[in-house]
């Protein structure tokens, strides 16, 4: 039986490059992504130089064709979560998924709606408690609460 590790870690949509670097660090230390991200599940293996890329393709795209194009370019799909596609490759030859700023900006625009939805749904139910139990301006309470929520990291071995 292989050794597995689950890690609960949150990233914001606009920090996908940091998430990719973290996944690459995990692979260099011998932990290879199996599924994710809620939680990330890793399997123990030989340390390796693996490149990870995350993408959020348009909802109206032909997903099988999109995945075939990525595969043909040398990217293996590891998992999917809420529309995000997680890819990896051990090849230094595989081209980047995004080669221009306009397409990268499009990816982040597609995420804006989801980010706003999450911010509203996680903040609004807590406003009455924020107002009743702690001093200070509401804006500060919301910012501190969201910052604490985003910085959650819990490792389960």
Image: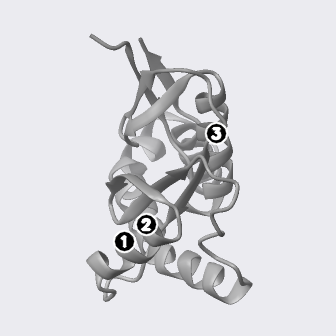
Task: Name the quadrant containing residue 68.
Answer: bottom left
Q: Which mark is residue 53?
A: none
The residue indicated by pointer 3 is 24
**Are dots 1 and 2 in contact, CB under 8 Å?**
yes
Q: In the displayed structure, does residue 99 sit left or right of residue 65?
A: right
State the residue position of label 2: 71
Residue in front for this viewpoint, 135 or 122:
122
Work out whether 24 lies above or below 107: above
**Residue at (52%, 60%) from the top-left corner?**
54
Q: In the rendered image, which quarter is residue 97 located in?
A: bottom right
Is residue 23 shown left or right of residue 58? right
Residue at image position (38%, 78%) is 66
Residue at 63%, 63% (x, y): give it: 94
Q: Secondary structure at mark 3?
A: helix
Name which residue lies at 73% across and 83% down: 101
Frontmost of labels 1 and 2 is 2
């Amino acid at each position: 039986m292989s050794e597995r590790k689950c890690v609960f870690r949150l990233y914001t949509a606009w920090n996908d490059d940091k998430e990719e670097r973290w996944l690459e660090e995990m692979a260099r230390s011998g932990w290879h992504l199996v599924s994710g991200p809620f939680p990330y599940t890793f399997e123990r293996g030989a340390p390796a130089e693996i490149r990870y890329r995350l993408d959020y393709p348009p909802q109206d795209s032909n997903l099988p064709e999109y995945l075939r194009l990525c595969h043909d370019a040398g990217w293996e799909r590891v998992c999917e979560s809420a529309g995000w596609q997680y890819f990896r490759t051990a090849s230094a030859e595989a081209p980047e998924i995004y080669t221009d700023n306009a397409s990268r900006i499009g990816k982040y625009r597609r995420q804006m709606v989801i980010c706003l939805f999450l911010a509203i749904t996680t903040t609004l139910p807590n406003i009455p408690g924020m107002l009743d139990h702690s001093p200070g301006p509401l804006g500060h309470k919301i910012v501190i609460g969201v910052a604490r929520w985003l910085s959650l990291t819990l490792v389960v071995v």
